[in-house]
Image (tube, rainbow, N blue to C red):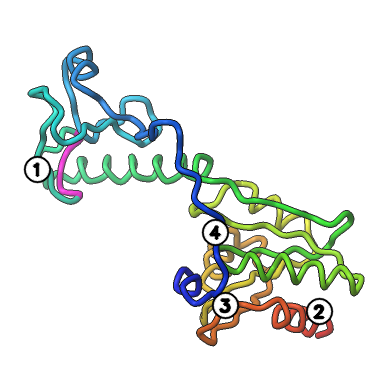
């Protein structure tokens, strides 16, 4: 977890400050609003579920709007109409589906011929990298997928499909990621094995190696 990072005693590499302006996505400035002629804050004009927006302080009369929660139509006007609610939910579903292929992709590394897969995320990664080397020295080849975002891309399903067993490594008590994977990919759930450890400290490669070998033996 992120909390574990604050308990480590090593320094992280210096942050490389970006040299390009931040891409703020689908933003309409004053010129864009003038060209469009109208602006509806929640209107999905191109079908990807992500409406255009304006930034505070934009000097154009169309830039400002008032809205509340999900009780509005696509122009941000207050509404309790069931059809407006349904349209909002459908747009959010399109947005969620599109996000899976546009968020940071998983990072996959693999030993040649590996039948055992590992899925991990966040600050567990250094322990997984070290553990894979130790396992390889014992003759156990592995592949690893470092998950970087949810909703997950198709890469995760393809990774699980390729391997005979997949261990989901988590530094929490209840194995939340394994639950999510099992729910999202029920046809692949029998391949998943949970490796969870939660004692208030970062995961260690030593624990991971012994826990995985014990489960393999079992």
- The residue pinned by badge 3 equals 202
Residue 120 lies, in percent from the top left, at 62, 65
Left of 148 or right of it: where is 164? right
Residue 202 versus residue 65: which sits nearer the camera?
202
Which residue lies under the disc numbered 1? 78
Q: Earlier in the sequence, mark 3 or mark 4?
A: 4
Residue 160 coordinates in the image, percent (x, y): 70, 58
> Badges 1 and 2: C-beta atoms under 8 Å apart?
no
Q: Marks 4 and 2: which is nearer the front?
A: 2
Residue 134 at x, y percent in the picture: 82, 72
Mark 2 highlights which residue?
216
Distance Cα–Cα, label 3 vs label 2:
23 Å
> Is label 4 in contact with label 2 (beta carbons under 8 Å)?
no
Q: Is residue 43 left or right of residue 105?
A: left
Mark nearer the N terminus (1 vs 3): 1
Real-space Cα distance between discs 3 and 4? Answer: 27 Å
Q: Are marks 1 and 4 in contact (CB under 8 Å)?
A: no
Q: Which mark is residue 184?
A: 4
Check disc 2: other Cα within 10 Å, few if <14, some if 14-19, many if 20+: few
Mark sitting earlier along the chain (1/4) = 1
Q: Residues within 10 Å of mark 1 (few under 14, many from 20)?
A: some
Q: What's the magenta bit mostly, secondary-structure-wise?
A: loop
Mark number for residue 114? none
> Looking at the image, which residue is at 16% across and 33% down?
75
């Amino acid at each position: 977890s992120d909390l574990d990072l604050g308990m480590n005693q090593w320094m992280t590499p210096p942050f490389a400050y970006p040299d390009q302006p931040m891409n703020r996505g689908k933003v309409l400035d004053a010129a864009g609003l003038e060209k469009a002629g109208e602006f509806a804050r929640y209107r999905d004009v191109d079908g990807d579920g992500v409406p255009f927006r304006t930034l505070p302080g934009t000097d154009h009369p169309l830039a400002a709007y008032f809205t509340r929660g999900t009780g509005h139509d696509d122009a941000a006007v207050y509404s309790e109409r069931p059809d407006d609610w349904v349209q909002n939910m459908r747009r959010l579903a399109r947005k969620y589906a599109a996000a899976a292929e546009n968020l940071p992709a998983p990072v996959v590394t693999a030993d040649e011929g590996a039948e055992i897969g590992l899925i991990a995320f966040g600050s567990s990664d250094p322990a997984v990298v070290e553990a894979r080397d130790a396992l390889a020295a014992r003759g156990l080849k592995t592949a690893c997928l470092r998950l970087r975002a949810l909703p997950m891309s198709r890469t995760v399903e393809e990774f699980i499909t390729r391997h005979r067993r997949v261990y989901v490594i988590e530094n929490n008590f209840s194995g939340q990621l394994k639950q999510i994977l099992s729910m999202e990919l029920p046809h692949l759930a029998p391949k998943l094995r949970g490796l969870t450890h939660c004692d208030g400290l970062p995961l260690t490669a030593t624990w991971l190696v012994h826990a995985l070998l014990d489960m393999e033996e079992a």
